[in-house]
Amino acid sequence: MASTLITVAPTGAETAKADCPALPTTLDELVETAKRCEAAGAAMIHLHIRDGEHRPTLELSRLTDAVAAIRANTGLIVQLSTGGAVTDPYDHRLRVLDAGPDSCSLTMGTVNFGDDVFMNPWPFVAELYQLSQEREVVPEFELFDLGHVAALHRLLDKFGLPYGGRVHCDLVMGVPGGMPGTTDALVAAVNALPAAVTSWSATGIGRTSLNVALAALSKGGHLRVGMEDTLTLAKGRPVTHNAELVERAAALATMAQRPPMSPDEARDFLNVKRDR
Ligand code: KMH
Ligand code: ZN
């Protein structure tokens, strides 16, 4: 039976701890979250980290410690965000790979991001991609818009396949400025993906989360959920732990007769490097 890769994105860079105390921001909270989410069905974690004041940071020693702590306490595939926060400079975002993750996010173009702009010009994307190939890190291509799908065609044509030979994407839908979190947009984006794509997941921001998950499952995709993207389970019902979102995703996937993939299966599925 086919199975579902569930990625949890527990923290992100946009929500303040003061506004949402349940957001995991310390290393201990991240490890506790990772363990519970693995038990609930997640196979990969998409990590953003925070500093001692709970502010987003790309400080290398903290990234390295987080990778080591998640590896020591779970079997999850560790994906570090190279997107960081909209204020992070390009050189800090490239340096993320020095922390030796299994996977890294790689956004395929610039996008309006609420009132901000998430900058991903072509030369930066090309440099980060080639660095991921050199460091043997499996990228996850983040697609916020249909134009990002076109850029993925261009990237693969110019620089070839990623490390490991699999091409895994995540459609990030419902960002104010990007593609909407609708079934129609998901189908349009999936139908436009390069033939080299071997798997894709989808993420719906905020209230689009459930609709995007259902559309992704019915179209044969995988799921990314977590408090980076969604802070309520329903109107008036705040998420109190990331595991609630993973449990819901796992239940939907099981109902669709595509139960969650184990981390070990996901390592083969994405062909991440085994001996880190
Ligand atoms: N925080 C956003 C500006 C990624 O992780 O690569 C970028 C983001 C994408 O979350
Ligand atoms: Zn992220």
Image (spheres, rainbow, N blue to C red):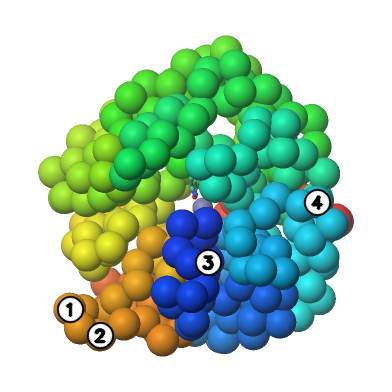
Q: Reading the chain from its start, which is encountered first: label 4 or label 2? A: 4
Distance from the alpha carbon under mark 3 to that under mark 4: 17 Å
Residue, disc 1: 235
- Tag 4: amino acid: Leu
**Where is mark 4, residue-wise?**
60
Q: Tell me, yes or no, whether the two marked residues, 3 and 4, touch with CB atoms within 8 Å.
A: no
Identify the residue at image location x=50%, y=36%: 107
The crowd level at tag 1 (other Cα within 10 Å; few <14, some 14-19, many 20+) is few
Q: Earlier in the sequence, mark 3 or mark 2?
A: 3
Q: Looking at numbered disc 3 in the image, what kind of residue is underneath it?
A: Thr
Upstream in sequence: badge 1 or badge 3: 3
CA gap, disc 4 and disc 2? 36 Å
Left or right: 93, with 176 as reference point = right
In the image, what residue type sits under mark 1?
Lys
* Direction from residue 209 to residue 7 in the image, left or right: right
The answer to which image quadrant residue 245 occupies is bottom left
Looking at marks 1 and 4 on the same chain, the residue that comes earlier in the sequence is marked by 4
Q: Quadrant of the N terminus?
A: bottom left
Residue placed under numbered mark 2 in the picture = 237
Query: Is residue 171 in sight in this rendering?
Result: yes
Q: Which amino acid does the dot numbered 2 rest on?
A: Arg
